[in-house]
Each structure stands twice: as C-alpha cells, then as structure tokens.
Image (tube, rainbow, N blue to C red):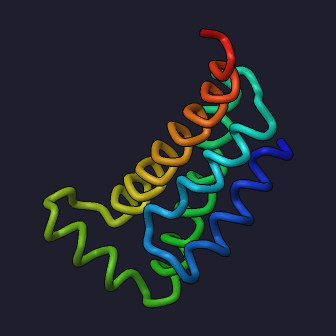
Amino acid sequence: MILALLILISAFLLNLFLPWWSIAIPGLLFGYILNKKSGASFGWGFVALFVLWGGQAFYIHVANDGILSTRIAEMLGVGSPLIVIFATAVIGGLVSGFATLTGSLMKGEVGTE
C-alpha cells in the first residue's frame, strides 16, 4: 500500500512539470528501493496510476461537462466517454506497473551473475 501511495504522489508531482512518460520514473525508483515481489510490484504500480490518471480524467470530464472526452470518444469511435476515461486509466496503470516491475527485477538481478 505504501508503494502505491509513494508512486501516486510522486507521479502526480512529476506530471506537473515533465512529460507524460515521467510517470515511469517513480515506479522504477520505488520498485528498486522497496523491492517487493514481482507480482506485488506490478500490481501496486498499476493501481497507483490507474487511480491517478483515472481520477484526473474523470475530473476533467466533470469539470468541462464531458465535452472533451465526448469528442475524443467520437474521434476514436468508441461511443462512450467513460470508455476513454477507462482506457486512459489502463494505459497509465500499465506504464507504471511495468516500470515498477522493472525496478523490482533490477534489484533482484543485481549481483546474481
């Protein structure tokens, strides 16, 4: 749980100043430092960014009465703006989950040659 909170907070702060892919940096660092098992690392990294990006996308959807997400849904041909919000959350979760998994596996692989 602490892993997810650390990733969520630091990814939010990095995303204010850096490009979208900077969400992988906290996952790599905290995955390496905390060195959980690989499944747990991926899971907590996924959950952290799924909640963060899903929450931000939903906030934007509500704040502008769904105009932006509806137009993106029409452009992509998915029909519902909620699918766009869900897809955004899943993409963020996958990026962070794999980054956290990578950090965890790097810690486990160091010095085992």
**Vertically, is 50 above or below 67?**
above
Q: Which quarter of the rendered picture does the C terminus lie within?
A: top right
The image position of residue 69, as x and y in percent, is: 33, 74
Q: Residue at x 51, y 64 (%)?
A: 22
The image position of residue 66, as x and y in percent, is: 39, 81
For the image shown, how many numbered marks are present on the structure? 0
Q: Residue furthest bottom?
A: 64
Residue placed most toward the observer, 47 or 71: 47
The image position of residue 16, as x and y in percent, is: 58, 81
Question: In the image, 53: left or right of 76?
Answer: right
Q: Residue at x 59, y 66 (%)?
A: 55
**Vertically, is 28 above or below 40?**
below
Q: Which quarter of the rendered picture does the N terminus lie within?
A: top right
Q: Residue at x 14, y 70 (%)?
A: 75
Q: Residue furthest top?
A: 113
The image position of residue 25, as x and y in percent, is: 58, 56
Q: In the rendered image, which quarter is residue 39 located in? A: top right
